[in-house]
Image (cartoon, grey):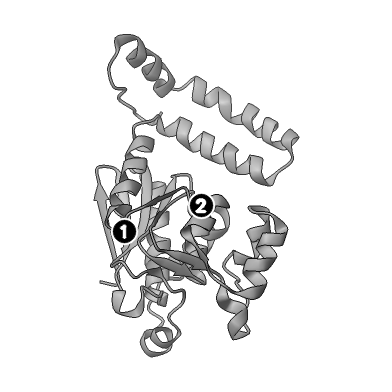
Amino acid sequence: MDLEVWNDSGVVVARINRPEARNAMTQAVIAGIGRTMREADADRDVRAVVLTATGDRAFCAGMDLRGFVAGHDGAESTEDLASFGRWQRQGITKPVIGAANGTAVAGGFELLLACDIVVAAEGARFGLPEVKRGLLAAGGGVLLSARIPIAVAYELTLTGELIDGERALALGLVNRIVPSGAVLNEALVIARQIAANGPLAVAATKRLTRAAAERPAAEVWALQDDLAPAVFASEDAKEGATAFVERRPAVWKGR
């Protein structure tokens, strides 16, 4: 299968499995990622998603144009394809951790930009080389200046040159760099740390954190005023306090 998906105790792992093509995305892979994100978002028992790929050479080389032309038969669900676009543009309520097992370029780098947290392998490189082919990084790459200084965003998007993991870490584009064979395990450690927390609180906190990066402060405060009462009045909030007092792990119900 070009996209392998499994559930690891409430953490959904989606792994692009096309190492012979540097894990480049076909239409089927895109649809599969979209379906995975939509289904994970709707499943109350899912607490986080990890997105990774097979091998140690590449996380994803972007769109596989040859595979798209040769293998696309129009069978992919339009709902799945639309779900992929919604995830890239709006995110989902569940945290998504990117586990970059290798270099990520073009659409592959844009996959990581859509993740909430990124763990990268030593030696991995990152970039948006679309301009070298007369193309536009239309999967969110040109919005890079919202996350890093505009001069650096210009450098990356207009030269198309790649950067190494250390620079990506310094720019805040990845969270951690680990040995190649440890990437998935490290991502799962983070995912399980998140999964151990109250799901309602995690969802509200993620939504507010993203809003704070994109919207005026007054709107974020208003959103917090809307979200906080339901969280504080939830069964989970009571359970969290009770578990703390009783010195035991909390048992979350998501309500």
If you read the primary sequence from the N terminus, does the residue marked by circle 2 or circle 1 appear first? 2
Relative height, residue 12 to residue 200 (above, below): below
Number of marks in the image?
2
When the figure is inspected, residue 78 is found, relative to residue 144, above or below; the finding is: below
> In the rendered image, which residue does mark 2 sit on?
169
- Horizontal and vertical percent for residue 231? 50, 25
Q: Residues within 10 Å of mark 2 (few under 14, many from 20)?
A: some
Crowding near the residue tagged with mark 1, few <14, some 14–19, many ≥20 C-alpha atoms within 10 Å: some
Report whether residue 99 is seen.
no
- Give the residue type that dot 1 points to: Ser
The residue lying at 56 percent from left, 76 percent from top is: 129
Q: Secondary structure at mark 1?
A: helix
Type of the residue with mark 2 = Leu
Q: Is residue 154 visible?
A: yes
Which residue occupies the extreme bottom position in the image? 70
Q: Residue 56: x, y in percent?
A: 31, 66
Question: Taking 48 as reference, is 152 left or right?
Answer: right
Q: Nearer the viewer, residue 146 or 76?
A: 146
What residue is shown at x 27% (from left), y 57% (from top)? 181
Q: Residue at x 68, y 58 (%)?
A: 145
Where residue 72 sits, quadrant-wise, is bottom left
Q: Quadrant of the N terminus?
A: bottom left
For label 2, the SS is helix
Residue corresponding to mark 1: 180
Q: Quadrant of the C terminus?
A: top left
Relative depth, front residue between 128 and 196: 128
The residue under the point 58% across, 77% down is 130
**Residue 193 vs residue 207, the one in the foreground:** 193
Instruction: Give the answer, above or below, for where 166 lies relative to 138.
Output: above
Query: Does residue 185 appear to the left or right of 221 in the view shown?
Result: left
Q: CA distance from mark 2 to mark 1?
A: 16 Å
When the figure is inspected, residue 237 is found, relative to residue 68, above or below; the finding is above
